[in-house]
């Protein structure tokens, strides 16, 4: 997807602050952090929203969560806790239409979320 911001990061056209990279996913630091630690786990393949997932994508979703776990452990948040979020479409506040998992940590999270 040539006009997709996160595809441009995956291809290297744009170079974000990369926190993790493997053959399945990348993790970048969010440009507008909502917590002391705020990363986005992005699959290398373009999937627009959770609605667009197919059974063939089951592994990539698991890989995204494994990367979130790795990030939390590597940055010292695994024990105290952290929040993982995927926003889907307008009412959830999705603004970038390439699947991504938010990983937020370093402060107490509220429930219910806003
Ligand atoms: P959404 O609202 O779609 O769930 O999350 C999109 C996230 O991407 C937001 O938290 C926003 O701050 C982040 N974001 C948008 N543009 C950029 C960018 O150019 N670089 C980085 N690192 N994050 C971005
Ligand atoms: Zn994309």
Image (tube, rainbow, N blue to C red):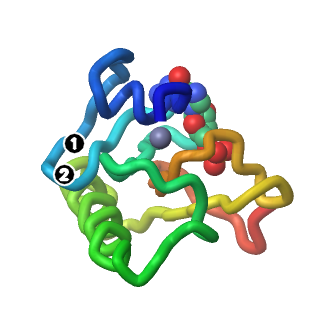
Kindly state the secondary structure of the residue where label 2 is placed.
helix
Apparent side of residue 62 relative to residue 94 in the rendered image (left or right): left
Alpha carbon distance from label 1 to label 2: 10 Å
Residue at the spot 31% in from the left edge and 33% down from the top edge? 10
Residue placed farthest to the left in the image?
A: 23
Return the mark for residue 74: 2
Horizontal side of residue 96 vs 37, given as left or right: right
Identified at 47% across, 27% down, the residue is: 2
Would you place residue 73 above or below residue 22 in this image?
Answer: below
Which is nearer the eye, 72 or 48? 48
Q: Is residue 64 above or below residue 40?
A: below
Seen at 55% across and 26% down, the residue is: 3
Distance from mark 2 CB to nearest ligand 1 atom below 8 Å: no
| Position of residue 41 measured from the top left corner of the image (x, y, whole percent) | 38, 50
Quadrant of the rendered image holding ligand 1: top right
Q: Earlier in the sequence, mark 1 or mark 2?
A: 1
Whether 57 is drawn above or below 92: the answer is below
Mark 1 crowdedness (10 Å alpha carbons): few <14, some 14-19, many ≥20 = some
Name the image quarter holding residue 39.
top left
User: Outermost residue toward the right?
Assistant: 91
Q: In this figure, which residue is indicated by the disc labeled 1?
A: 20
> x%, y% of residue 55?
41, 83
| Mark 1 vs 2: CB contact within 8 A | yes
Looking at the image, residue 66 sits to the left or right of residue 87; the answer is left
């Amino acid at each position: 997807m040539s006009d997709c911001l996160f595809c441009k990061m995956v291809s290297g056209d744009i170079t974000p602050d990369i926190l993790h990279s493997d053959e399945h996913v990348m993790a970048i630091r969010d440009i507008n952090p909502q917590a002391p630690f705020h990363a986005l786990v992005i699959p290398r393949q373009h999937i627009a929203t959770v609605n667009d997932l197919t059974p063939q994508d089951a592994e990539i979703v698991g890989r995204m969560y494994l990367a979130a776990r790795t990030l939390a452990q590597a940055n010292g948040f695994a024990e105290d806790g952290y929040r993982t979020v995927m926003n889907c479409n307008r009412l959830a506040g999705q603004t970038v239409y390439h699947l991504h998992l938010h990983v937020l940590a370093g402060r107490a999270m509220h429930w219910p979320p806003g």
